[in-house]
Amino acid sequence: MTLLDLNLPQTAADVHELDRSDVETYYIPGGKVYERFFECPLDYQHPSDGRSVRVFARHIVPVGKEDQMHTLPFLLYLQGGPGFECSLPGSIKSGWYATAVAEGFQLLLLDQRGTGLSSPINADTLASLRLSTEEQVEYVSHFRADSIVRDCEHVRHALCRGRAGAASRKVALLGQSFGGFCITTYLSLFPGSVSRALITGGVPPLVDHPDPVYQATFRHMISRNKQYYEKFPRDVARMHAIIRHLNATDVTLPDGGQLTARRFQQLGISFGRTGGFDSVHQHVLSAASDLEASGCLSAHTLAAIAAAQSFDANPLYCILHEAIYCQNGNASRWAAHRIREECFADEFEYRWDRIQRRRDPTAPVYFTGEAVFPWMLDDYAELQCLKDVGLGLAEYTGWGQLYDTDVLAANTVPVAGASYYNDMFVDLRMSEHTAQSIAGFRQWITNEFHHNGLAASPRVLRYLLDLLKGDITDL
């Protein structure tokens, strides 16, 4: 006899997540959106300690298939980062969304814990917890890929409850950049929960600490800088003028942060994306034109530069970035900063007096790429409030394992990944080594796209899906 037979009200725990009437819903072109929240343990090693996080997943069902939610397979998308949320698509009739829908999926777009609507980490939320610095470091240590994957499992259990057969309770995974790192952790921890896995620009290096990563990526940035200045040779002189000005002048951005020479160099992170050279050139041209006209940077130029840098809006990207490479109790100890100073100080110099003392003082000033530095905790307004926890995380040695190489070597999950020949975020050679370490991995190496290939063209996801089906065999 059931509660329905007794005519008793069902509790929230009895109602299937997909049948809840209190979930907010609305339509976008091509799909009906369900905004779902899940309560998950903060620390999965101690789930009963009373600490929890709220995880948000945007569930999108193709229009006309709302009554098939209990049977349609799920494609769970894991965003790049760390520290970035999933944005609401304007439509699922185009881009990779349309490809996924045509493949028969309903979509799950997860705000990874610490981002977006999933217990976001920022100066205000950490302060509200009233924790010591040491306690804040311990708290934030639970926001890496291993915990994100366990959140995904929590969500999968809730949404797939009651489905007949183990196969129907599995999810397909799509991971962009850091999302691919998460997928590799997923394949290490819960391979039996995954029907197939697709990685774009995010086949991770299987390292225990970040030093070798930055040895490789700084070399990529030297190459990208040379290409940039070949395209915009007049920017050599413009950059000299800008760097000289920022070394001599205190420049405050609209949000209260400081625009230093070293911060201006960080605009080079755009070099890894389609159109990145052009966008950086516009900042350089605007700043140099301001200096020529008035001797200072205009409010318009400063606002554009601030908008191009996301470290304040997504602070986890700075304070937890190097930790995504840490295993076996290794601390990151500001790896990018150390490698830059030890191996690439001349190429990426930002101090004007030292630039003038270089062998060729007229040589270009290089931009930096995807790297975080301790001085960011002084230059960025929001990060200033997180300085103590950021410094603490850089010295933290409590990191556990993210990848199980034995499990990956025995993998049976169909998995394919796109690796980009000119990717300055994820080193190709390291990605190739990882792909060779995962049984059955089908790797597509291409120079057709930059790191943002998934967003740039629906062909990327289509190619990977066909690769897994065997429709493409000429690799």
Image (spheres, rainbow, N blue to C red):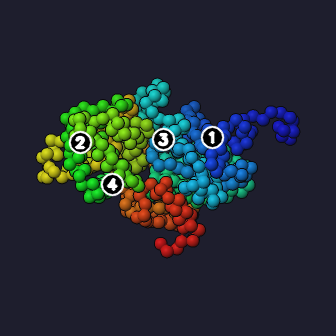
The local crowd at label 2, few if under 14, some if 14 to 19, many if 20 or more residues have their Cα within 10 Å, is many
How much space separates mark 4 and mark 2, taking CA atoms?
25 Å
Residue hosting label 2: 242
Q: Which of 34/292 is in front?
A: 292
Residue at image position (21%, 38%) is 245
Q: Which three-letter amino acid code belongs to the residue tagged 4?
A: Thr
Residue 422 on image: x %, y %? 37, 60
Residue hosting label 4: 217
**Of the residues tagged 3 and 4, which is closer to the observer?**
4
Residue hosting label 3: 143
Which residue lies most toward the bottom here?
474
Residue hosting label 1: 35
How much space separates mark 2 and mark 3, taking CA atoms?
38 Å
Q: Vertical placement of 42 versus 459: above or below? A: above
Q: Which three-letter amino acid code belongs to the residue tagged 2?
A: Ile
Q: Is mark 4 on a helix, strand or loop?
A: helix
**Of the residues tagged 2 and 3, which is closer to the observer?**
2
Q: What element carries label 2?
A: helix
